[in-house]
Image (spheres, rainbow, N blue to C red):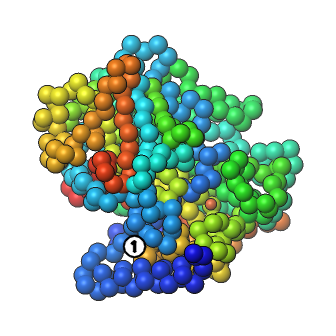
Amino acid sequence: MTKIDTSSPESVLPTPSHTVGPFYGYALPFPGGGDIAPLGHPHTITVQGYVYDGEGRPLPDAFVELWGPGPDGRVPDVDGSIRRDPSTGGYLGRNGVEFTGWGRIQTDANGHWYARTLRPGARGRSAPYLSACVFARGLLVHLFTRIYLPEDTAAHATDPLLAGLDPARRDTLIATDDGTGTYRFDIRLQGEGETVFLEFQ
Amino acid sequence: MTLTQADIDQEIAAEHAAYEKRLADGAPVEHHPRRDYAPYRSSTLRHPQQPPVAIDVAKDPEMVELASPAFGERDITEIDNDLTRHHRAEPIGERITVSGRLLDRSGRPVRGQLVEIWQANSAGRYAHQREQHDAPLDPNFTGVGRTLTDDNGFYRFTTVQPGPYPWRNHVNAWRPAHIHFSLFGSAFTQRLVTQMYFPNDPLFAYDPILQSVTDDAARRRLVATYDHSLSVPEFSLGYHWDIVLDGPSATWIEEGR
Ligand SMILES: [Fe+3]
């Protein structure tokens, strides 16, 4: 059953998703996972928030993956996000110079996550955004969402996704400027203020 | 109230029957679990109640999600795909070789992309701080591996057969032996985290995580095949497991799908 016959499209059926479970913590997160921006880059932004469940409790066992273009709107094709040290087998960390556009951030014991990345540039018909993918114990299929930035108001009005959303839910996709120079983006998996999640077709 | 295996069995059967009825009424095949699958109790407060918002990628080929993060030789070391060589001595357990292809929905190989795995040791214990199961840790086994797919989309790992382990979903809950996989495709939309199982495990029917995939054929796709040609003489037993990533990619647009 698990040698896939690629001779006809009908036999190429997707492998089902499964939860990441509780025990990925020593395997998937890596030091500096959220330090995506090259060191000292002038267009660095900090995004932070919490992941909440349906009772408003923060999740200590979730992680977020961020993926976005550079300030010029170009999507990087650069490896090196999880550089390894061939002598020790440990993580070397990013080199601090190249921008890979991707990061993985474990929530801490308070359910809090943060990332420093580059301000995304606009692409195509969309307002600038970071793509975010959420994984957690208890979540059988990961969840995609997007992080838009609050000052791009004009672009939001014509963004194909935002323009089509119920105004009451649209704001769940727009980070808030919390006055400390960082953007706040909370992810609510369920219930009041539930984040808008996406399905790509 | 104590939640027994019999209670969970009943819930699993009811979910399965509900799915069969949806199919009979003309609903599409469900290749993935529903996020609100009550027999897996941890899903109760962690699934959205609103339907996801659909995005038609064909309308915008520039979409960020149609590109994928890149990984390369810098991101792995030479022995990352041999979990039996990460410590001074050999781990305890049956050595196994797990190999297969990473494909997209068109059956095309995904080349040079990152495959990450993690698993319990042969006694069913994870090298994880919060793990409370008291089976022995193996000082010679961490249970984490990674590799890049080759030009034909093949990945290959050497590891030990993981043990089944108990968990606290209900009384006497045991997970069938499995290896966790994390995969990237040619587009971020194809991201997948899943688990690979071993043939003929008697725990399959009791496990609400495996049974969350209510489609029988889809569930079978999570089980590797014993492959004698992958077994290494006097060293390891071989299992073949191909992985097909769902989700649209930029190549779909080129083909006008
Ligand atoms: Fe597990």
Q: Is residue A88 above or below residue B181?
A: above
Seen from the viewer's position, the closer of residues B228 and B130 is B130
Residue A140: in sight, yes or no?
no
Q: Amino acid at mark 1?
A: Ser
Residue B179: in sight, yes or no?
yes
The picture places residue A185, in percent across and down from the top left corner, at 36, 35
Horizontal relation, residue A60 to residue A115: left or right = right
Q: Secondary structure at mark 1?
A: helix
Label 1 crowd bin: few (<14), some (14–19), many (20+), radius 10 Å: few
Q: Is residue A36 above or below residue B41?
A: above
- Identify the residue at horizontal 43%, vertical 69% (top origin): B37
Pinpoint the chain carrying mark 1: A
The picture places residue A132, in percent across and down from the top left corner, at 38, 41
Question: What residue sits right under mark 1 in the picture?
Answer: A11
Q: Quadrant of residue B207?
A: bottom right
The picture places residue B179, in percent across and down from the top left corner, at 62, 61
Q: Is residue B219 above or below residue B251?
A: below
The picture places residue B86, in percent across and down from the top left corner, at 77, 45
Q: Quadrant of ligand 1?
A: bottom right
Horizontal relation, residue B90 to residue B224: left or right = right
- Identify the residue at horizontal 65%, vertical 45% (top origin): A26
- Identify the residue at horizontal 46%, vertical 48% (top origin): A57
Q: Quadrant of the C terminus of chain A?
A: bottom left
Seen from the viewer's position, the closer of residues B95 and A195 is A195
Q: Residue furthest right?
A: B89
Horizontal relation, residue B136 to residue B126: left or right = right
- Identify the residue at horizontal 28%, vertical 26% (top origin): A121
Seen from the viewer's position, the closer of residues A64 and B142 is A64
